[in-house]
Image (tube, rainbow, N blue to C red):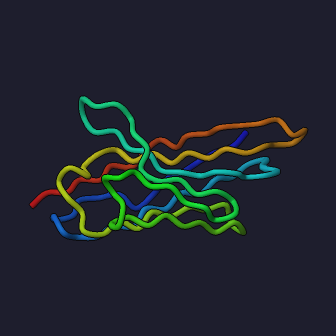
């Protein structure tokens, strides 16, 4: 079983910065893509950014140039540095991790989410 735990959310003023962290743990054999998604009230969950084990990244157009995703393969941790935050970035941010566990069984796990609120 794989656990994914996010941290680092909070309240920040427009133009401010926050850094989210997410650690995956458990019987992980290989960890492939990790990513961040978000869901604002009344809206569907949407992709924010993803990163492969080799470091290739993908970003939503709405966060391009403001957010940076990175990962530490040694600790199975992914980060999301969020700069120049806007009120429309307010959402619950979820971490996602995919890979294989013992016996090469694939898994996709989600964290419980962390609230990010951008408001003056």
Quadrant assignment for the N terminus? top right
Q: Which residue is drawn at 22% across and 70% down?
A: 16
User: Which of 110 and 52 lies nearest the eye of the viewer?
Assistant: 52
Tally of numbered tags: 0
| Left or right: residue 30 compared with residue 17 | right
Where does residue 56 sit, x and y in percent of width and height?
Answer: 61, 61
| Left or right: residue 40 compared with residue 73 | left
Residue that sits furthest to the left in the current view? 120
Q: Which residue is drawn at 52% across and 43% down?
A: 111
Residue that sits furthest to the right in the current view? 103
Where does residue 79 sit, x and y in percent of width and height?
Answer: 50, 64
| Left or right: residue 48 compared with residue 58 | left
Query: Compared with residue 92, is residue 56 higher up or lower down, i.e. above or below?
Result: below
Where does residue 88 sit, x and y in percent of width and height?
Answer: 20, 49
Quadrant assignment for the C terminus? bottom left
Q: Residue at x 77, y 36 (%)?
A: 106
Residue that sits furthest to the front in the current view? 61
Where does residue 49 sit, x and y in percent of width and height?
Answer: 47, 53
Query: Compared with residue 108, is residue 79 higher up or lower down, i.e. above or below?
Result: below
Q: Residue at x 16, y 64 (%)?
A: 14
């Amino acid at each position: 079983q794989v656990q994914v735990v996010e941290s680092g959310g909070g309240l920040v003023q427009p133009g401010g910065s926050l850094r989210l962290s997410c650690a995956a743990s458990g019987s992980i054999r290989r960890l492939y893509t990790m990513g961040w998604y978000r869901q604002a009230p009344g809206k569907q969950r949407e992709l924010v950014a993803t990163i492969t084990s080799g470091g290739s990244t993908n970003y939503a157009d709405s966060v391009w140039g403001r957010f940076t995703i990175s990962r530490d393969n040694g600790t199975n941790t992914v980060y999301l540095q969020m700069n120049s935050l806007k009120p429309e970035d307010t959402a619950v941010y979820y971490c996602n991790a995919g890979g294989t566990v013992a016996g090469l069984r694939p898994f996709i796990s989600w964290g419980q989410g962390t609230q990010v609120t951008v408001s003056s």
